[in-house]
Every structure is written in structure tokens, then in C-alpha cells.
């Protein structure tokens, strides 16, 4: 038995009743010295989608304090060696940020798709998500960076000329730590970081793009399965500098949608776009999980889009197509032209009924018309018919600009109101002024003007 840790999940196939869902799918923690079980509350349910229960005897990785271990007979205060998560070193991560002339995914976006993207936008999305290259194979690297700026994992994927996973390649999808172990260090001792990293119980412990949440605290979030899909969403619907644009993140794969990862989304408005699947199983799984997440994360909104379910044929479902497979057929300019300036968030036009829990409303399953790549003309009609008449905020905007230009702005974070905290005052002002100028008089953007006026009041106290 591995004695590197004080406690580990029990090896083998034995399962216990889960204290959360009651199913016999629960793996308990054991003491590595005595082999005895820890109390039944400590363990992990392997029904990750439908339950997600996991209570560890270790404290948070940033806390080395003494813990209380509950025994069946008495309480024992014990100092334990906390196994901290190990991250990919900066120098290893930075070595991937090169070789884009050999990057098959990037070059396809620039040259061979039906509507090639502008170089500036490709450079921008590379910088935003820290995309990289495995120069030997042309694979694209997708780093998973958490809210603390730590690189927790780097996925590597080889794409074909249509930017689909090139399944003719034996190792079309792998991870940087795995590749290094079996290539560069195949017949050599592993470096200390890699040896320690391999002991991480969970490798992909955060969302792809999670590092952007603090930088763009006001954007609604679009959550998809794969990193590639998040890149396409950003390129088509615009970058998050515009606070009303969606911030596109990915969970990694279908089964990776869980409470632990979604903790970073607390307080946000989240729109989920599951891939197509045979019998709509993926959609149903994410819809069920969204209902659970809605209960577990107060003040967070989860809405599951049935956009693909409306568009996809049975053949598309069998192939498991995602939103990127539809988007790439159309000119990205049509999606960005005025869309981000006039629509503050996805517009629900068809909403199905969902069960409501006793304490909270279940997430709505929604089809977002403005995101349909097949209905651009209809989008324009919706915008013309439903947008309210413009007012004129020019005087208010000019007065706010004069005030902020003449006021020394705090460098530290400040509390705007009971539910809002500004981490970067200068960026907050810049983004909000940009929004109200671009949308002067459109009533749905009035909250941006109100927040600026509220900030002015706070700074004058």
C-alpha cells in the first residue's frame, strides 16, 4: 500500500453506500498505516454526473493547519502531512507558447476554413487562452489555468484539415505530462516536478479559461465541453472586453461538469451548451446536473441551451457534433456585426418547463435565437422589433468622464454595493464607459450607466 499519504481512497472494486445519493457506488478513504476505514463521511461517489459527492480528509491545499479526524470512538487531534497539489512549472508551460507556424489548428483557422479569421483575432485568442504548440507533431496545447494562475494541466490535440480530431494519429489526444514521461524521459529519471505531479489525485481540477473569470468579472459565461469549442465561441461571438459578450469556458469533457469545478462560477450567469449525442443523453445529463448545481451554488444561474437539439439531425447526434461544427460553416462577421453592441445577453425565445425544487427555481432550458447560425435574417428582425427606443445619455456620460479623469482612483479593490466588488477600478470604468458610449440610450444597457454613477457616489464619500 502506498504510504506517501496518510489517507488514500481504497484500492480495488469494493463499493459502499454513498451518504449523499444512497447508491452503492461510494469509495471510502482508508488509513495507510492501519488499513482501517475513516468515518463513512470521507470518500468519493463515482456517480460524478448524478451525485458528485466527495469529502476528503485533507484540508484545502493552501491550509496546513491541524485538523480534527473523527474516530468511531473518540475525537483525535492529529497533525497530518498535507499533500499539496503539484502544478506544471512556468518554464515548462512557457516552452509551449511558440511554433504557431506549425500549429495545424491555428493555420487552418487562418487559411483553409471557408471564412478565414483575421490574424489580429487569432493572435488575440492565442494570448487570451495561452494556446501553444507541440512543434514535432503540430498539436495544439490547451492549458487549464486556475483562478490563482497555476497551470494544472495541459491537453494536447492533433487536428486534421477540418479542425476535427485527427483520429488517424495514434496519439491524437494526450497530455503534456504523459507525453514528456514517455518520450523525453522515457529512459531517464523523471524530474522531481513530474514525479510529484503524477501523484495528483485529480489532474484536470479546473475549467479551461478559468483564469479569465477574475479579469472579466461581469460577463455572462458560456460553458461547453471541449476547449476547441470555447475558442470557436470567442472567435464568432466576440471577445470578453465587451462586458455583455459571453466568456467562453470549457469543462474538458461531458463527465467533467461537477460542483468542484463550477465553484469558480459562483455568482455568475452561466449558459451551458452540451454537445449532441445519441438519444440526447448528453443534453439530459447536463440538464440534470444544472438543476443540482443551481441548488448548490446560491446566486448563480444555470441555463441549458437546447440550440443543438433543435438544429441537429439524428445523424449529427450519432456523430456527437458540437456548436463549433455548425459555426464554422458560416461567416463569423455576420455573428459579430452589431450583435454584441445591441444584445446584452442570449435572448430566450423558447423555454421548456422544468421542475422546481422547494427552495429554488430549476434552470431553464433555452434556445437562444441569436446564436443560431442558420437564422441571421431572423436575428436582425428580432433586434429591430424588440429593442426599445433610444434615450440620450450624452450629458451624463460627459460628466462621468470629467469626474473620473479628475479623481485619483484607488488601486485596491473596493465594494461597490452589497453584492458587487470591483477588483480593478480603472478597468471597470474603462469597460463600462466603452459600453454606454457604444450603446447610448439603449435601455437594457442602463445598468452600466447606473453602476458608473454609483461608483462616483462611493468615491465622493
Image: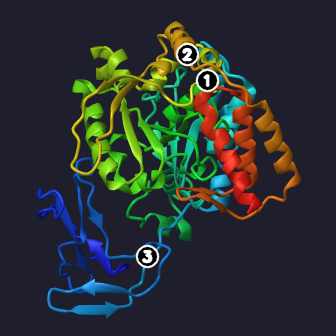
Q: Is residue 134 visible?
A: no
- Earlier in the chain: of badge 3 and badge 1, it is 3
Numbered tag placed on residue 83 in the rendering: 3
**How many numbered markers are drawn?**
3
Residue position for label 1: 342
Residue 72 position within the rendered picture, expressed as x and y whole percent measured from the top left: 15, 86
Work out which quarter of the rendered image holds the N terminus and state it. Answer: bottom left
Work out which quarter of the rendered image holds the C terminus and state it. Answer: bottom right
Q: Nearer the viewer, mark 3 or mark 1?
A: 1
Instruction: Give the colouring mode of the picture.
Output: rainbow
**100 sits left or right of 104 in the view:** right
Residue in the image at 47% along x and 68% along y: 85
Residue 201 position within the rendered picture, expressed as x and y whole percent measured from the top left: 38, 64
* 52 in relation to 225, above or below: below
- Find the distance from the CA under tag 2 to the CA under tag 3: 54 Å
Query: In front here: 190 or 25?
Result: 25
Numbered tag placed on residue 167 in the rendering: none
Q: Tell me if mark 3 has few (under 14), some (14-19) or many (20+) residues whose alpha carbon lies within 10 angstroms of its own.
A: some
Amino acid at each position: 500500500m502506498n504510504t506517501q499519504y496518510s489517507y488514500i481512497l481504497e484500492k480495488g472494486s469494493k463499493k459502499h453506500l454513498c451518504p449523499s445519493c444512497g447508491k452503492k457506488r461510494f469509495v471510502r478513504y482508508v488509513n495507510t498505516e492501519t488499513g482501517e476505514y475513516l468515518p463513512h463521511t470521507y470518500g468519493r461517489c463515482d456517480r460524478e454526473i448524478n451525485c458528485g459527492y466527495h469529502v476528503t480528509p485533507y484540508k484545502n491545499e493552501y491550509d496546513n493547519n491541524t485538523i480534527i479526524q473523527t474516530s468511531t470512538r473518540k475525537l483525535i487531534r492529529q497533525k497530518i502531512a498535507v499533500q499539496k497539489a503539484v502544478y506544471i512549472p512556468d518554464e515548462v508551460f512557457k516552452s509551449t507558447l511558440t511554433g504557431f507556424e506549425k500549429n495545424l489548428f491555428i493555420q487552418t483557422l487562418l487559411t483553409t476554413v471557408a471564412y478565414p479569421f483575421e490574424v489580429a483575432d487569432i493572435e488575440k485568442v492565442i494570448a487570451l487562452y495561452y494556446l501553444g504548440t507541440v512543434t514535432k507533431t503540430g498539436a495544439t496545447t490547451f492549458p487549464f489555468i486556475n483562478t490563482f494562475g497555476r497551470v494544472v494541466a495541459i491537453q494536447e490535440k492533433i487536428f486534421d484539415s477540418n479542425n476535427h480530431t485527427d483520429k488517424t494519429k495514434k496519439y491524437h489526444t494526450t497530455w503534456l505530462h504523459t507525453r514528456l514521461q514517455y518520450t523525453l524521459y522515457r529512459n531517464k529519471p523523471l524530474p522531481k516536478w513530474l514525479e510529484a505531479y503524477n501523484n495528483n489525485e485529480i489532474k484536470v481540477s479546473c475549467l479551461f479559461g478559468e483564469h479569465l473569470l477574475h479579469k472579466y468579472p461581469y460577463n455572462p459565461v458560456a460553458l461547453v465541453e471541449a476547449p476547441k469549442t470555447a475558442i470557436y465561441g470567442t472567435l464568432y461571438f466576440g471577445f470578453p472586453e465587451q462586458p455583455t459578450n459571453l466568456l467562453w469556458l470549457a469543462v474538458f469533457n461531458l463527465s467533467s461538469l461537477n460542483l468542484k469545478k463550477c465553484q469558480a462560477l459562483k455568482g455568475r450567469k452561466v449558459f451551458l451548451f452540451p454537445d449532441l449525442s445519441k438519444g440526447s443523453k448528453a443534453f439530459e445529463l447536463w440538464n440534470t446536473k444544472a438543476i443540482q448545481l443551481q441548488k448548490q451554488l446560491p446566486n448563480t444561474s444555470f441555463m441549458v441551451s437546447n440550440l443543438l437539439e433543435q438544429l441537429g439531425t439524428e445523424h449529427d447526434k450519432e456523430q456527437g457534433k458540437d456548436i463549433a461544427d455548425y459555426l464554422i460553416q458560416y461567416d463569423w462577421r455576420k455573428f459579430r456585426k452589431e450583435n454584441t453592441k445591441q444584445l446584452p445577453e442570449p435572448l430566450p425565445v423558447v423555454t421548456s418547463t422544468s421542475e422546481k425544487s422547494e427552495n429554488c427555481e430549476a434552470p431553464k432550458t433555452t434556445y437562444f435565437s441569436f446564436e443560431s447560425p442558420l437564422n441571421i435574417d431572423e436575428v436582425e428582425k428580432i433586434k429591430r422589433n424588440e429593442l426599445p427606443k433610444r434615450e440620450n445619455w450624452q450629458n451624463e456620460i460627459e460628466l462621468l468622464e470629467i469626474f473620473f479623469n479628475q479623481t485619483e482612483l484607488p488601486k485596491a479593490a473596493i465594494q461597490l454595493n452589497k453584492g458587487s466588488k470591483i477588483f480593478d477600478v480603472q478597468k471597470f470604468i474603462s469597460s463600462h464607459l466603452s459600453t454606454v458610449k457604444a450603446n447610448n440610450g439603449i435601455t437594457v444597457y442602463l445598468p452600466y450607466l447606473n453602476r458608473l454613477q454609483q461608483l462616483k457616489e462611493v468615491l465622493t464619500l
